[in-house]
Image: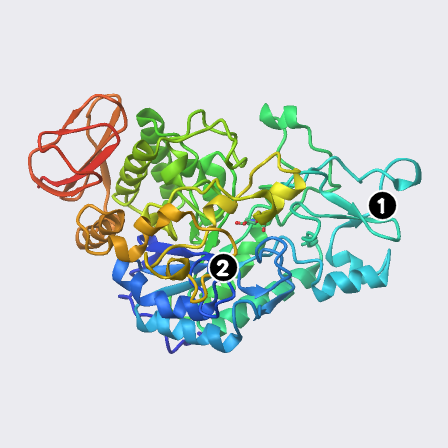
Amino acid sequence: MTKVSTQQPQSAPGHEWWRSAVIYQIYPRSFADASGDGIGDLGGITARLPHLAELGVDAVWLSPFYRSPQKDAGYDVSDYMDVDPLFGTLDDFDRMLAEAHTQGLRVIVDLVPNHSSDQHEWFQAALAAGPGSPERTRYIFREGKGPGGDEPPNNWQSVFGGPAWTRVADGEWYLHLFDSSQPDFDWNNPEVGDMFVEVLRFWLDRGVDGFRVDVAHGNAKAEGLPDVDEELIAAGSMDSPFFGQEHVHEIYRRWRTVLDEYEGDRVLCAEAWVSPLEKMARFVRPDEMHQAFNFVYLETPWDAAQLRSVIDESIRAFGEVGAPPTWVLSNHDTIRHRTRLALVPPPPHGAGIGPTSKSKADPTVSLRRGRAATALMLALPGSAYVYQGEELGLPEVTAIAPEQREDPTFHRTKGELWGRDGCRVPIPWESEAPAYGFSPTGETWLPQPPEWATLARDAQAGVEGSTLELYRRALALREAHGLGTGELEWIDVGPTAIGFRNGDITVIANIGHDAVDVPRGEILLASSPLDAASLAADETVWVRTA
Ligand code: NOJ
């Protein structure tokens, strides 16, 4: 039976909108706060949707707004089929969805299947039922090692720091790849799979256009939960026993059959931090997901040879399975690319930056570079994700006091890693309003830097040369020239620049220090004000040459 939705924006038959869509990530707690409590909410999103339609994106992805104790900003879900009162109600969600569809925007929601909150009724039941009970088999409980079982069952470490196991009162240990408040499900238990199919249907029936799947590479663990041997993994002779296990793909094949029952091109997008690209592309084979964030691209430094190679490899690897590449530069887990690409020295992955970090970015260089990187990304064929605030050129915020920081990474590592709060600061809408228009009361759950007044949306709208106008123009041109559905043809512009044609547009990005010639033709877009004859360092230009 084909399920018919009344609301999905229409696309031409066979168009498969997601192949070339630009999708805007809304991080609800930091987007717009209608209630005034300092935390963004669904009412705030609904009110601001016209701005996104006007920006020219095709869809939005919302990070979690489900019931949650908010130990990991909502990625600790206690009820997958309800809205947390912090963000509103199910009715608010329906209103937001209807308004998005009216504005021609599709809506992708986040699904968190690797773990729940420890406040989920299943985990509470598992604790109450005790060792050996069927309730415990929905999670990964084990006896400890060593005398008295006092040692964790294996040597796995939490992504947020410290051991990945916590002991409960009766002596058993449970696995949590993230915070101790986020117990991992045991996907060998069929009840878990069935519950998530119910969750998929719940949101599909409400009319969502798809799901971004959290830790999509983590649900399946290696049989017997073997110890990790970092040296063997680094040498390529051992696969991670918890990330990228082959049998994880069975889960998504089942989900795909569910989505295919629904009309309207609903999609699945994998958050899968796996490499090489061939492994990532396995998530988007024709009977699995539709998209997978290209994190290999995100992690590539600002270097012409490396960028050319990752773009080439991505188009090849995704193309081999018939999927589009899905480009991304920023999200709520990474240092904003406007800052990251200019950090010297580059910090270790996942560390974040703070007020005392050695890594610093020159604000002028980093803005030029961030804009040039975006202009390069948006010219590539395939789909692309942009993260709220990047269209304003927001930098990573370092001035957040320890007591204001909420990321469990900061707290679990006792401040050794700064974590991700710096990319999650509430975004500025109006330069003169309290909290720059984020909340009517001036409350914000993280402090906004005073210099953000000049970056507020209303300070940039209609201003020639602003980052907001650059994004708008790039998105409009991308659409008008079909760049997302185009094909890339490399042109030689020397070792420290990148050049390619996509349809009638020639794109040159100068990644090095030496000036590069701008080809003859009509200049459609320049990431920074251009000296007509040449492209300076950290600039990208789109020229109509055909
Ligand atoms: C990835 C999410 O993007 C991140 O924010 C979260 O902390 C972890 N998964 C755990 O759910």
Q: Amino acid at mark 2?
A: Arg
Q: Quadrant of the C terminus?
A: top left
- Residue 438 found in image quarter: bottom left
Identify residue for label 1.
143
- Residue 434 found in image quarter: bottom left
Q: Where is residue 42 drawn, in percent x and y?
A: 46, 68
Q: Can you see residue 160?
A: yes
Q: Where is residue 201 drawn, in percent x and y?
A: 53, 70
Q: Where is residue 528 drawn, in percent x and y?
A: 21, 38
Considering depth in this image, is 456 or 198 the residue closer to the camera? 456
Q: Where is residue 10 drawn, in percent x and y?
A: 30, 70
Point 61% across, 26% down: residue: 237
Point 26% across, 54% down: residue: 459
Image-based side of 119 in relation to 286, left or right: right
SS of the residue at dot 2?
helix
| Other residues around mark 2 within 10 Å, as few (<14) / some (14–19) / many (≥20) | many
SS of the residue at dot 1?
loop
Q: Give the colour scheme of this rendering.
A: rainbow
Identify residue for label 2.
29
Considering depth in this image, is 459 or 410 the residue closer to the camera? 459
